[in-house]
Image (cartoon, helix red, strand yellow):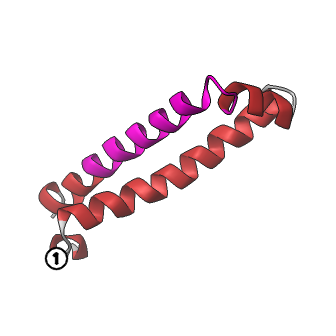
Amino acid sequence: MNTYKNHSFLKLTIRFGFIFLIVITFIKIVISIFSNGGIDGMLSEFFSPTTWQLFVKMQLLMAALYGVFMAGYYKFIKK
């Protein structure tokens, strides 16, 4: 039996989205460190005064979409 059926849709969305946000942000930062020549390259790519807002918005949007998709799948589709 699927234990996710008993949880609320919002709780599932937040749970899946938060885990996705942490994992994907960590992976993007690590890959950027290696591909841009160190921490300075990563900082200039993601956290400069002109790019940090776009980075945060993209991460939050991806996490929200993933959370909604996975919560919908586990709550309504998976048996």
Residue found at x 39% / y 54%:
17
As displayed, is residue 12 above or below residue 70?
Answer: below
Say what secondary structure mark 1 lies in: helix
In x, y percent, where is residue 55?
A: 55, 32
Residue found at x 47% / y 59%:
19
Q: Is residue 68 magenta?
A: yes
In this view, which residue lies farthest toward the top? Answer: 50
Quadrant of the image containing the N terminus: bottom left
Q: Nearer the viewer, residue 73 or 12?
A: 12
Range of magenta residues: 47-69
Q: Nearer the viewer, residue 72 or 39?
A: 39
The three-letter code of the residue at mark 1 reads Asn
Residue at numbered disc 1: 6
Residue 33, located in which quarter of the rendered image?
top right
> Is residue 44 left or right of 40 when viewed as pictured?
left
> What kind of secondary structure does the magenta stretch mostly adopt?
helix
> Is residue 59 left or right of 77 when viewed as pictured?
right
Quadrant of the image containing the C terminus: bottom left
In x, y percent, where is residue 2?
A: 21, 72
